[in-house]
Amino acid sequence: MEIQSVFRLTDSDPSGRLLGVVIQDSGSRASTSEADRGARLCEGHELDPATAKPVPATATGRMLKLDEAAKLLRRIERQITKRPPAPPVTRRAVNVA
């Protein structure tokens, strides 16, 4: 099985207002219906395999509405392993004579 890259693409209208998000794997093409209505790519990021894993197949290849994208982002964030907090740093006081 070939591993494909997964991308999160953010689209806006000509005035810069956010329209939605497309999750797309490298082997597919998203619907062009949003592009036909004037949507423009304003941002794109490749998702690493751990981040792409919780993305359901039903969310790929189409424009997600903003509320759908927000729910998916929260789902992804819950799956990401958090790093432990950094240990506290203590500083020794310096006497200035």
Image (tube, grey):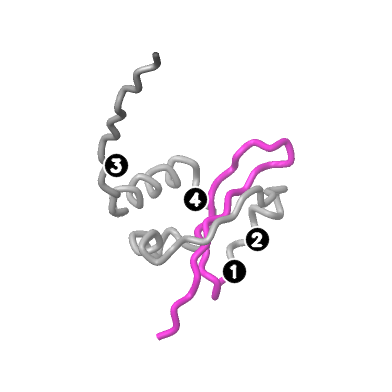
26 left or right, relative to 89: right
Q: CA distance from mark 1 to mark 4?
A: 15 Å
Residue shown at 39% from the left, 49% from the top: 72
Q: Name the amino acid, label 2.
A: Thr
- In the image, farthest residue toward the top: 97
Q: Nearer the viewer, mark 1 or mark 3?
A: 3
Residue 26, magenta (yes or no): yes
Residue most extreme to the bottom = 1
Q: Mark 1 Cα within 10 Å, few/some/many (few <14, many 20+)?
A: few
Question: Mark 2 = which residue?
Answer: 32
Q: Which range is magenta?
A: 1-29
- Residue indicated by mark 4: 64
Residue for badge 3: 86
- The CA span between labels 4 and 3 is 36 Å
| Dot 4: element | strand
Q: Earlier in the sequence, mark 3 or mark 2?
A: 2
Q: SS of the residue at dot 1?
A: loop
